Image (cartoon, rainbow, N blue to C red):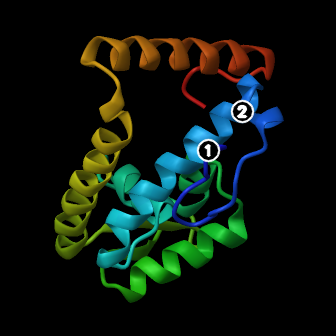
Amino acid sequence: MSPRLGIIIDMPVPPSLVDRDGALLVIAARTGQQLATRRLAPMGLTVQLCGVLNRLAVGPVSQQELGGQLGIDRTTMVELIDDLEAMGVVVRQRNAADRRAYSIQLTSKGRTVQKRAAKAFDAAADEFFGALRPDERRELAGMMRRLIAAADKKLGKSSGD
């Protein structure tokens, strides 16, 4: 029996993909995302919306910077902010220095929702990584950080991009 992609994409994975490291990374990420989606959906959130909330928990940021930091294109970023604004969890404020720009920040409701979402996301991660011992999980995280840093270097990105 071949592995299945899981909740959202419930199709068998061809053995030829399971034997490829890159494909395994994609399948693992997709599966982890599906577990997180299942936990976030009751809050009306997606993994992408949760990522925006988590970044905003650090502090207000311009809409353009937010999209750049999260790797989200401008059109999608506007839609995500519109959704979060409709939920009452973020507000847009005009930048006094540049009236064309908006600063995005969490509302008090947004801070509460972000904390709940972060706990749900962490629970999904614990569920996903539950097959690993704590030392294996730490080792895997270290290896992934090295892979990302090496790829970022080849792409000409600094570690903060």
Left or right of residue 136, residue 14 in this image: right
Specify the amino acid type for callout 2.
Val
Left or right of residue 99, residue 44 in this image: left
Which residue matches tag 1? 3
Vertical side of 92 occupied by 128: above or below: above
Specify the amino acid type for callout 1.
Pro
User: 10 Å neighbourhood of mark 2: few (<14), some, or many (≥20)?
Assistant: some
Q: Nearer the viewer, residue 4 or 53?
A: 4
The quadrant of the picture occupied by the C terminus is: top right
| Residue 61 visible (yes or no) | no
Q: Which mark is residue 68?
A: none
Picture residue at 40% right of the left edge, 88% below the top:
86
Picture residue at 30% right of the left edge, 76% below the top:
43
Picture residue at 38% right of the left edge, 41% below the top:
128
Q: Are marks 2 and 1 in contact (CB under 8 Å)?
A: yes
* Cα separation between marks 2 and 1: 8 Å
Q: Based on the displayed image, in which of its 4 quarters is residue 60 positioned?
A: bottom left
Return the residue found at the far front: 1
Which residue matches tag 2? 18
Q: Where is residue 143 drawn, in percent x and y?
A: 52, 12
